[in-house]
Amino acid sequence: MEFTERARGSLLGGALGDALGWPIEFMHLDAIRRQHGGAGLTDLADADRGGQVTDDTQMTLFTAEGLLRGGRREDLHAAYRRWFHTQRMPGPVSSPDGWLAGQDFLYASRAPGNACMTGVVLDYRDAAPFGQEGPVNPQSKGCGTVMRSAPFGLAGLGPDEAFRRAADAAQLTHGHPTGYLAAGAFAALIERVAAGMPLPAAVDATLAQLATMPSHAETTEALRRAVRVAAEGPGSAEGVERVGMGWVAEECLAVAVYAALAAPDARSALVLSVNHSGDSDSTGAVCGNLVGALYGLSGLPADWCALVEGREVLLQVADDLAALARGDRAALGDRYPLPVR
Ligand SMILES: [Mg+2]
């Protein structure tokens, strides 16, 4: 399978999981089952929100934009500040800073995470060495780090650099080591799967990589739990909730990995990843990034792809990341003005 097909699948899959999980983000599993039946919410058409995406997809697009507009940690900071403006403004200004900030649909504010909002307004601060608390929101390990980090694995960086850059950029908003190491592990996992590695092998390689990092224990334990519960039998909401609720970074990553391992295809993995009492849009988004990279765009439910908000922009940005990965800046047109250094 072509890399571009996997990159497209990863970004669009994330949006599908985000859109499927958003209507049930703050619902207990019992309430979801009362409203949607015993199997839960199983069809994006039944979500009844027009395929809307939230901060998870919005920030993922700005992560990609930061990579495409220079790729340094300072460039990610600038990109996340452009995202912050979308959460404060009614729509694009007449001369937006870059093509992405000109997209109307990004100017919806749908329960963005607190650490992301408070972190990006601060002036730029250097990252702390791995294992130490970062300088911004030092106690925070919310899933806002993981849910935005897939593009680091789609930019042709290789697993080591994808991990390092994602974890460093996660520290722009979250300082708890588990918060940023889970983001690094997710980016490295996406990199491996998008390169064609089977998922179980990619998880094993990422666990081995994590083991070399200080303060990795919480993230490692969560990922091991995902593998262990997935091996016990078919995926279930009860299995998801034994793995975690997804509000914190390592549980969000683990629930996504559990769903991808336990389900036989992308659609059932997405359904599994959102029907629980936890942070459904983020676990859905992260699982969608993963199964999209695994099965490719053509492996995603086509009827959901037709519904989801921002589809054309997501596909363009995926193609742009693939162009960046192969060193073809000419393919990017004038969408990503580079910083003046
Ligand atoms: Mg969200």
Image (cartoon, grey):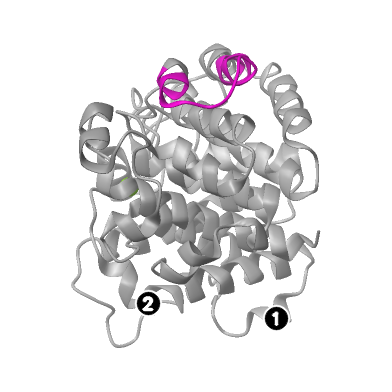
Q: Is residue 280 left or right of residue 333?
A: left
Residue under the image location 44 percent in, 73 percent down: 100
Residue under the image location 79 percent in, 49 percent down: 195
**How would you rate the neighbour count of disc 1 (Cα within 10 Å): few for under 14, some for 14-19, many for 20 or more?**
few
Query: Percent x, y for residue 138?
Result: 36, 26
Helix, strand or loop at disc 1?
helix
Query: Percent x, y for residue 261?
Result: 63, 31
Q: Which residue is mark 2?
A: 103
Query: Percent x, y for residue 113?
Result: 28, 42
Q: Amino acid at mark 1?
A: Ala
In which quarter of the view is residue 80 placed? bottom left
Q: Amino acid at mark 2?
A: Gln
Q: Nearer the N terminus, badge 1 or badge 2?
A: 2
Q: Is residue 249 left or right of residue 69?
A: left
Closer-to-camera residue (320/95): 320
In which quarter of the view is residue 84 placed? bottom left
Quadrant in which the C terminus appears: bottom right
| Numbered badge on residue 331 | 1
Query: Percent x, y for residue 231?
Result: 65, 17
State yes or no: residue 99 in magenta.
Answer: no
Point out the stretch of residues depicted in magenta.
Answer: 224-241
Closer-to-camera residue (91/227): 227
State yes or no: residue 240 in magenta.
Answer: yes
* Contact? badges 1 and 2 (CB < 8 Å): no
Residue under the image location 36 percent in, 31 percent down: 142
User: Does any portion of residue 270 appear in the rendered image?
Assistant: yes
